[in-house]
Image: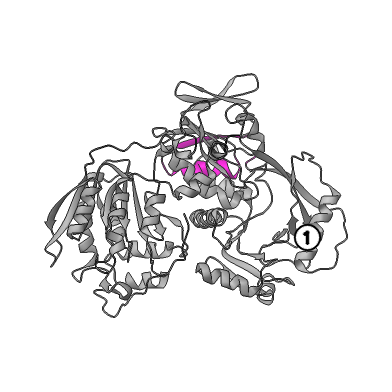
């Protein structure tokens, strides 16, 4: 999906009873009351809350988030309903979202002030992403898709139970009601799906009918004479592609191999969906392999075309910040990150931000003087400031996630898994003698390079690389960075008088010893980064670790293809997957940045919940992507 800059809404609040969107010459809601309108038209028109009673999950898709009143009314109805579904997922698309201060003003006198305050507090940076906002201990999810509805309806991976059609009036906003958008709804409609809207325009009803909905007119809200409700009743049932089928929709127990960042994140994401995990790791402690560095960075990225890597890194960084805010405080967390820019001038950096309209709470461009002041270092280049990025101790982060998942007491360490295989409805983990270590209906492979042997038979063609990295520790460093700095290597203050700097990267180098040459490399980078005189090499402490990466430098997340099956191999969604088996690996040096989003995506694929990532990015991290690329190569 090609993204477009997000243009925030301009709202006229001169009439508090009916805020107006001047660009569309229309009000956001009826003067008779926004919440009352939402309850009558959208909840009543979709027969809610009755239809979600006792359901495991109920999914709503709204076209036009506006001021957020439909979401708040729905959340309020859910919390008051003793028969409510276990989880309410509310997907909403908004091309022109409100700035945080405007949302706060719009909800200043809300009759649902407690819910509105939580929504304002969770409001994300206005970037063209699918933002996953969690409420009520993850039992209410808002998947906020910022951008054009036509684009997003092609990219969503979700089955929808009820549609709230709520754009501005068709005369001033025809694109939100055209037949192409209405037809796209059918691709997401679950069995028995319904729709409701305040409009009764003939073209709307004709478009819904053409998309497979049976429409009827009902009494409208306040002074509106009618409204339209509809039920999905297609002539032909659409089948979900094999590659999009849930991997283990009924599993309530999972076995996770790997107690690093990926495994801990998977345990927490699964726990929030009611799936308890047991975790196995071959090392004596949590996060002792590639996740075991004393400190690590997390941040987004950007590039001129807002390509796959930039969009995925941005989505992942935003999700990481959200997770960290939900966890108890870590022993330390450095907020904000500077990344030196070595090619572009400050003017070019500012133009790039302006062209993409990226908000300052996501990224800023600083000149060398401002970057030096922020970091406490003598920096010679301009730098990107990521306010939501930073640094933290990976071991403490992984430990906190396992505790939040209540999996810390179910973690078995010093336990080497030699092989896995499927036995009936379970996956089994075996030791070197072939004895059973554990089994579960869902197995998640989340180990680093030490788990590569488990993939030899299941996915021998995955292009995985082991990258050796060596960090160096300067015990007494002067100056020390006030916040993490990257771009020529990286440097993180250690909280005392020193810092960690690095890191080297060598493919398939399995030497575990600290090497003086690598220390010299790290010291040279630190001296260049901070504009220091050459630092003499001395005996330094350090750490060597191996990161598991892929050839395209993106993780592998999802189900593993069933080997040997014929059929379409040109798109990931058509490739059948091994039931009950998921993978979340290959995070390279971005484990802190990526683990949260990857775990949420993997969990959605396991359970069949709406995926918090657009389809093109989902394809980009799919384990089957390498087979798809091979299938698309011209035959010689």
Seen in the image, is 373 located left or right of residue 626? right
Residue depicted at 67% across the width and 66% down the height: 341
Seen in the image, is 571 located left or right of residue 397? left
Q: Hey, which quadrant is residue 475 in on the image?
A: bottom right
Q: Which residue is mark 1?
A: 525
Element on which disc 1 rests: helix
Seen in the image, is 471 located left or right of residue 202? right
Residue 135 visible in this rendered orientation of the protein:
no
> Local crowd at mark 1 within 10 Å, few (<14), some, or many (≥20)?
many
Please tell me whether residue 204 belongs to the stretch shown in magenta.
no
Which quarter shows the C terminus? top right
Residue 318 drawn at (x, y percent): 51, 58
Residue 69 drawn at (x, y percent): 29, 63
Q: Hey, which quadrant is residue 468 in on the image?
A: top right
Q: Which residue occupies the foreground of this view, 235 or 352?
A: 235
Seen in the image, is 623 located left or right of residue 185? right
Residue depicted at 48% across the width and 42% down the height: 602
Residue 381 visible in this rendered orientation of the protein:
yes
Please tell me whether residue 261 belongs to the stretch shown in magenta.
yes
In the image, residue 554 above or below residue 219: above
Residue depicted at 86% across the width and 50% down the height: 516
Residue 467 drawn at (x, y percent): 71, 44
Q: Hey, which quadrant is residue 329 in on the image?
A: bottom right
Residue 271 drawn at (x, y percent): 45, 41
Magenta segment, which residues? 259-286
Residue at the far bottom: name it: 14
């Amino acid at each position: 999906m090609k993204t477009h800059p997000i243009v925030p809404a301009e709202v006229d609040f001169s009439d508090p009873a009916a805020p107006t969107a001047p660009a569309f010459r229309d009000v956001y809601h009826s003067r008779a009351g926004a919440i009352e309108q939402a309850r009558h038209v959208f909840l009543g028109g979709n027969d809610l809350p009755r239809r979600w009673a006792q359901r495991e999950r109920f999914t709503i898709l709204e076209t036009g988030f506006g001021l957020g009143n439909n979401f708040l009314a729905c959340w309020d109805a859910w919390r008051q309903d003793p028969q409510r579904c276990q989880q309410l997922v509310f997907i909403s698309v908004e091309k022109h979202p409100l700035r945080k201060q405007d949302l706060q003003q719009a909800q200043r006198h809300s009759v649902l002030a407690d819910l509105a305050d939580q929504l304002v507090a969770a409001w994300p940076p206005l970037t063209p992403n699918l933002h996953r906002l969690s409420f009520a201990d993850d039992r209410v999810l808002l998947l906020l898709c910022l951008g054009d509805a036509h684009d997003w309806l092609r990219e969503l991976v979700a089955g929808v139970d009820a549609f709230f059609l709520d754009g501005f009036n068709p005369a001033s906003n025809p694109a939100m009601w055209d037949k192409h958008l209405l037809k796209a709804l059918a691709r997401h409609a679950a069995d028995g799906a319904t729709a409701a809207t305040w409009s009764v325009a003939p073209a709307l009803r004709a478009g819904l009918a053409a998309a497979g909905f049976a429409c009827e007119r009902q009494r409208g809200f306040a002074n509106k004479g009618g409204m339209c409700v509809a039920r999905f009743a297609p002539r032909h049932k659409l089948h979900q592609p094999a590659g999009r089928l849930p991997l283990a929709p009924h599993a309530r127990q999972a076995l996770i191999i790997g107690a690093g960042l990926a495994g801990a994140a998977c345990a927490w994401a699964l726990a929030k969906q009611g799936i308890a995990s047991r975790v196995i790791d071959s090392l004596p402690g949590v996060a002792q392999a590639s996740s075991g560095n004393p400190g690590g960075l997390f941040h987004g990225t950007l590039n001129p075309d807002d390509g796959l890597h930039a969009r995925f890194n941005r989505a992942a960084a935003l999700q990481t910040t959200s997770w960290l805010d939900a966890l108890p405080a870590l022993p330390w967390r450095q907020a904000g990150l500077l990344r030196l820019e070595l090619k572009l001038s400050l003017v070019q950096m500012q133009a790039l931000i302006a062209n993409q309209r990226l908000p300052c709470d996501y990224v800023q461009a600083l000149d060398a003087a401002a970057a030096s002041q922020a970091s406490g270092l003598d920096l010679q280049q301009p730098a990107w400031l990521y306010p939501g990025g930073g640094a933290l101790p990976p071991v403490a982060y992984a430990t906190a996630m396992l505790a939040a998942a209540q999996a810390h007491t179910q973690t078995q360490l010093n336990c080497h898994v030699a092989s896995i295989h499927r036995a009936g409805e379970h996956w089994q983990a075996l030791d070197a003698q072939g004895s059973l270590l554990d089994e579960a209906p869902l197995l998640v492979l989340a180990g680093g390079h030490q788990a590569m042997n488990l993939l030899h038979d299941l996915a021998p063609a995955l292009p995985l690389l082991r990258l050796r990295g060596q960090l160096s520790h300067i015990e007494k460093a002067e100056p020390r960075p006030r916040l993490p700095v990257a771009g020529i290597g990286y440097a993180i203050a250690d909280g005392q008088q020193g810092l960690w700097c690095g890191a080297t990267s060598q493919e398939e180098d399995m030497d575990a010893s600290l090497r003086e040459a690598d220390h010299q490399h790290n010291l040279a980078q630190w001296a260049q980064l901070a504009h220091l005189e050459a630092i003499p090499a001395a005996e330094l402490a350090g750490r060597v670790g191996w990161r598991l990466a892929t050839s395209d430098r993106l993780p592998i997340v999802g189900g593993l293809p069933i080997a040997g099956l014929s059929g379409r191999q040109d798109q990931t969604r058509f490739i059948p997957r091994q039931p009950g088996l998921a993978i979340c690996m290959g995070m390279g040096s971005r484990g802190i940045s990526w683990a949260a989003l990857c775990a949420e995506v993997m969990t959605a694929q396991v359970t069949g919940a709406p995926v918090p990532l657009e389809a093109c990015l989902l394809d980009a991290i799919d384990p089957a992507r390498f087979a798809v690329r091979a299938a698309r190569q011209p035959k010689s």
